[in-house]
Image (tube, rainbow, N blue to C red):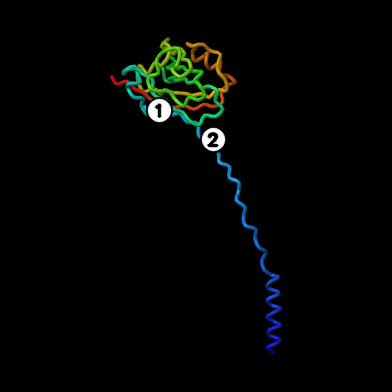
Amino acid sequence: MTFAILTLALVVSVLLGCAKAPQSVPPQPATIQKENKMEFKLTSTAFQEGQPIPRQHTCDGVNVSPALEWSGAQGAKTFAIICDDPDAPSGTFVHWVLYNLPADRIGLVENVPTTDNVPGGGLQGTNDFQKIGYGGPCPPSGTHRYFFKLYTLDSELPLKAGATKADLLKAMEGHIVGQVQLMGTYSRSR
């Protein structure tokens, strides 16, 4: 009887050994590809998206351009900026035109001089005040929206200083790689 139990135990252990679940292969670590693309953003230390533009950046203040910063631009050879007001009574009013800003640029300091050439590289165009450089918000009534539009371009544009928004838009055709905007508001207190 003991012999039969030992034989039975031996047969069961052999069968269990054969019936073992196959060893699973340890999972291989998945190749993780981090997306190096940052979100293309335009910000200002002067105001947040959709918020009022401070008086110093308007015709009621010292009328200096706000500081702008950008990040996440891909494929830039140059940048261009247009600031305009679509709420003007006579149609969209252009406040600032800049172009051929170098690709390594990540922003503009406050109070960019109103000269043909931008310090650090780039050119300024003519705004609808018929002046070179920045002309701040100056709405006749109500609250207006001011759109600062930043364009990433794949080339330098064949424009001289003093170009208008229309000139810039035409020159940018087929060269825009990306676009982002920042909108601020302004209302004059009477």
Q: Which residue is mark 1?
A: 44
Q: Quadrant of the rendered structure where residue 157 is?
A: top right
Specify few, some or many for label 1: CA neighbours under 10 Å numbering under 14, 14-19, or 20 or more. Answer: some
Q: Quadrant of the rendered structure where residue 154 is?
A: top right
Q: Residue at x 36, y 25 (%)?
A: 53
Between 154 and 7, which is closer to the camera in this rendering? 7
- 135 above or below 69? above
Q: CA distance from mark 1 to mark 2?
A: 21 Å
Where residue 69 appears, as percent x and y from the top left, is 43, 27
Q: Residue at x 41, y 17 (%)?
A: 88
- Which sits earlier in the primary sequence, circle 1 or circle 2? 2
Whether tag 1 and tag 2 are in contact, CB under 8 A, the answer is: no
SS assignment at label 2: loop
Residue farthest to the left?
A: 190
- Is 29 situated left or right of 140 in this image? right
- Is 151 situated left or right of 16 in this image? left
Quadrant location, the N terminus: bottom right
Between 32 and 173, which is closer to the camera in this rendering? 32
Q: Residue at x 44, y 25 (%)?
A: 107
- Tag of residue 127: none
Quadrant location, the C terminus: top left
Q: Which residue is mark 2?
A: 37
